[in-house]
Amino acid sequence: MKTFTKVPRFMKSFYFLFGAFFVVWMLFVDSNDFVTQIRLRSKLNALEGQKEYYLEKKVEVLKNREELTTNQELLEKFAREKYLMKKSSEDLYVVVTED
């Protein structure tokens, strides 16, 4: 019991003990603990980076869509390359290269 008498008086207080317990509980045990908050913050940063990427892609797709609706030659080229469409009087050959 002599070691317990060397502890400062304020550390024996109910309020100090309860406060220390509360801090430990909130930092390590609670469902919103410190480690979880760090993980969620890093995930949020990653998702914000993805959001920027998809917003840029959206602008690019809208630009391409506008070009396709206004330019018939570009629309025909797109249909031939992407969907392998052809005119009835044409033959279509697909050349596949192996790497």
Image (cartoon, rainbow, N blue to C red):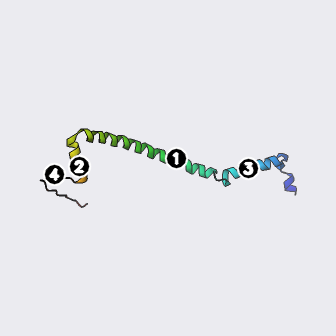
Q: Position of 51 compared to 98: left or right? A: right
Q: Position of residue 5 (x, y in %)?
A: 87, 52
Secondary structure, mark 1, is helix
Secondary structure, mark 4, is loop
Q: Position of residue 62 (x, y in %)?
A: 34, 41
Q: Looking at the picture, tell me which residue is in the foreground, 35 or 96.
A: 96
Dot 4 amino acid type = Lys
Distance from disc 4 to disc 2, alpha carbons, whole Å, reads 11 Å
The structure residue drawn at horizontal position 60% and vertical position 49%, both measured from the top left corner, is 37
Which callout, 1 or 2, points at the residue further toward the start of the chain? 1
The structure residue drawn at horizontal position 48% and vertical position 44%, both measured from the top left corner, is 48
Q: Position of residue 95 (x, y in %)?
A: 19, 58
Callout 3: few (<14), some (14-19), or many (20+) C-alpha neighbours within 10 Å?
A: few
| Residue on which disc 3 sits | 22
| Residue on which disc 4 sits | 87
Dot 1 amino acid type = Leu
Distance from disc 3 to disc 2, alpha carbons, whole Å, reads 65 Å
Which callout, 3 or 1, points at the residue further toward the start of the chain? 3
| Residue on which disc 1 sits | 44
Distance from disc 4 to disc 1, alpha carbons, whole Å, reads 49 Å
The structure residue drawn at horizontal position 29% and vertical position 39%, both measured from the top left corner, is 66
Dot 3 amino acid type = Phe
The structure residue drawn at horizontal position 85% and vertical position 54%, both measured from the top left corner, is 4
Callout 4: few (<14), some (14-19), or many (20+) C-alpha neighbours within 10 Å?
A: few
| Residue on which disc 2 sits | 79
Secondary structure, mark 2, is helix
Q: Where is residue 19 in the image (x, y as percent from the top left)?
A: 76, 47
Which callout, 4 or 2, points at the residue further toward the start of the chain? 2
Dot 2 amino acid type = Ala
